[in-house]
Image (cartoon, grey):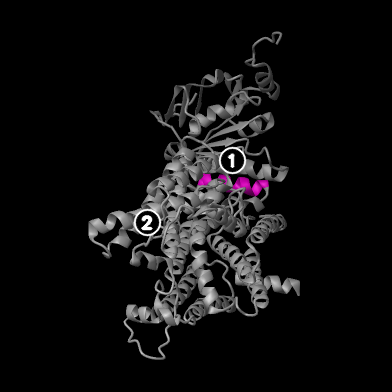
Amino acid sequence: MQVSKQTFFGKLGLDTRLLGMIGALVVLWVMFDLITGGRFLTPRNLFNLSVQTASVAVMATGMVFVIVTRHIDLSVGSMLGFIGMTVAALQVHVLPDVFGLGHGAIWIVAALVAVLMGACIGAFQGWIIGYLTVPAFIVTLGGFLVYRGAMWWVTHGQTVAPLDPSFRLLGGGADGTLGETLSWGFGVFASVVAVVMMLMSRRRKAKHGFAMKPVWAEGILMVLVVGLVIGFVWVMNSYKIAKGALPRIAEARGVEMVDGLQLFHGVAIPVIILLLVTVVMTIISTRTRFGRYVYATGGNPEAAELSGINTRLLTVKIFALMGALTGISAVIASARLGAVDVGLGTLDELRVIAAAVIGGTALSGGFGTIYGAVIGALIMQSLQSGMASVGVDAPLQSIVVGIVLVFAVWIDIVYRRKTGA
Amino acid sequence: MNAQTPLVELKNMSIAFGGVHAVDDVSVDLYPGEVVGLLGHNGAGKSTLIKMLSGAYVGDGGEIRVNGERAEIKNPRDARSYNIETIYQTLALADNLDAASNLFLGRELLTAFGTVDDDAMEAETRKIMARLNPNFRKFAEPVSALSGGQRQSVAIARAVYFNARILIMDEPTAALGPQETQMVSELIKQLKAEGIGIFLISHDVHDVMDLCDRASVMKNGKLVDTVNIADVTDDELLSMIILGKRPGETRVEA
């Protein structure tokens, strides 16, 4: 029984780690749903969960590269706060004077500045780490303090609000979604792309005469992927817009407001951003030279150097990428809240590191996947919002999350030892 | 002795680390199709000398000539551009990557879209391994799952695939069992027959007597002498290594 089961999943090409994480997620969800009497697995809660996960998950994909190369970045939470505050001040105090209040270019400029600012700060940290050879732990610990302080200076501690209305759409909420029709379109598009890519990979393998998965396994995988995508869209499209927001949303979507009108949320924009980031980062990690060098350097820095890889410049690039992703997360996090106070991003660095590590990124370097980090972020967020909805008080939440983190890493170590990876 | 231009000449090479002269005014050369052994105790400076040729270190003084022309080698990429390939004692492989990724590390094959072409690299790896080590099967596993000999054959395949003309082997059999050592010896003979020049770093006299045409012996960072293997005995070579005496010199108190 055990053996046939393993070969079944082996033929599907799914590794045990991925199955384990999905299993843990399902267990958590079912458990919370039972305890809350069916309030956890509702379209509404899953929508909120997806939006809350986005910011940390985006950064976690970058943290994978950082940790794979045996570094760490403790500064992302503070950096997120600093970037969020700067961009908030920019769009509230500066850009309206340039373009005029409510101008359509404000959110674009603000978002670009956020990403650029993150990339520059990250590159600078990476330069200190790579070229001046100060350990990443110290450099980013310094950054952790510096950016939190710098954030205060931007507005002398004042909260900046309200953010530009278009900018706020990037944070989700009732307005910040694709809407029903676009969501379905997105679901179909994503499914088609996934199936086409699986078919193309199969054709390439056939051309070289390599071993291929059995046709039935490939078929099951396709059904699973398409089912997951369409299922997700369906759930998001089942979350009704609340009565109070109905007239506003109807107007925004160009629907006539009539009695008995029902509108649904659809997939939130930050989730779309997260999915795009995940796809791009996965391509970078598995399909580009840069990604290959990240893993090679993590596995054996000396070998990478001797193979002609410029590992110093690589470090700069990795931290610049981490910074750019932090910029994206700063946009999502500040847009979601609609206002920025000096607490934005506090403790996010630990959530991000925990997500990457729970997702199977080894602190000893060389191993870690993008999808793992995203699922890791989802597990962390599920745990946190699940406990909140059950009514666990905040101190106990922290205790549980801390214990789960250590436990997950221990499981990972045992798994690695058994598989010899 | 040999009318051809040497493949490589290392002339008056020197390098010091914090006041210690690891290599002090050493000159060696290498001709096509020749295996030159570099012998000496640990710390004699043979690995350091060769790292200046492979681009891992930049020397303080001296000159490197490739095919009679002055060569500037400042990093491993420069060395590769002169078709100098190195197989390191520490087997410079990334343990977490598979054989193909290691073989092409730093020189990946790309698709038309500029992404790495893993399938093409695996196909090429299968081809070259079929020639070098037909029993090699573990193409999908990370190289940490390979035996010492299999890892060594990946390292050698890397050098051979990229048309090495000058091959540096740093203790290539140090971590291997007898059968695997035999396999590597056969490989060296095969490469030599193809006209590749090989520097073989070793502290095993028998290896050197077996495989090399000439041997350069180092002691305390200095060159003792370079001899034709045909002209010396094991014992003479050993006394060069241990006492730093040229063959024929009368033995003095050490």
Horizontal and vertical percent position of residue A2: 75, 72
Q: Circle 1 sits in a helix, a strand or a loop, which is it?
A: helix
The residue that mark 2 highlights is A88
Position of B107 relative to A246 (above/below):
above
The residue at the point 72 percent across, 56 percent down is A414
The residue at the point 33 percent across, 80 percent down is A251
Instruction: Name the residue type under label 1.
Output: Ile
**Is A99 left, or right, of A342 in this rendering?**
left
Quadrant showing the C terminus of chain A: bottom right
The residues tagged by marks 2 and 1 sit, at their Cα atoms, a distance apart of 66 Å
Stretch in magenta: B148-160
For mark 1, name the chain: B
Instruction: Name the residue type under label 2.
Output: Ala
Q: Nearer the viewer, residue A251 or B239?
A: A251
Residue A51 is at least partly visible in this image: yes
Quadrant showing the N terminus of chain A: bottom right
Q: Nearer the viewer, residue A281 or A295?
A: A281
Residue ranking furthest to the right: A1
Residue A404 in the magenta stretch? The answer is: no
**Is B184 left, or right, of A136 in this rendering?**
right
Residue A341, quarter of the rendered image: bottom left
Please tell me the numbered disc located at residue B188: 1
Q: Circle 2 sits in a helix, a strand or a loop, which is it?
A: helix
Residue A19 is at least partly visible in this image: no
Q: Nearer the viewer, residue B97 or B32?
A: B97
Horizontal and vertical percent position of residue A307: 50, 43
Report whether mark 2 lies on the same chain as mark 1: no
Q: Nearer the viewer, residue B50 or A155?
A: A155
Position of A175 relative to A99 (above/below):
below
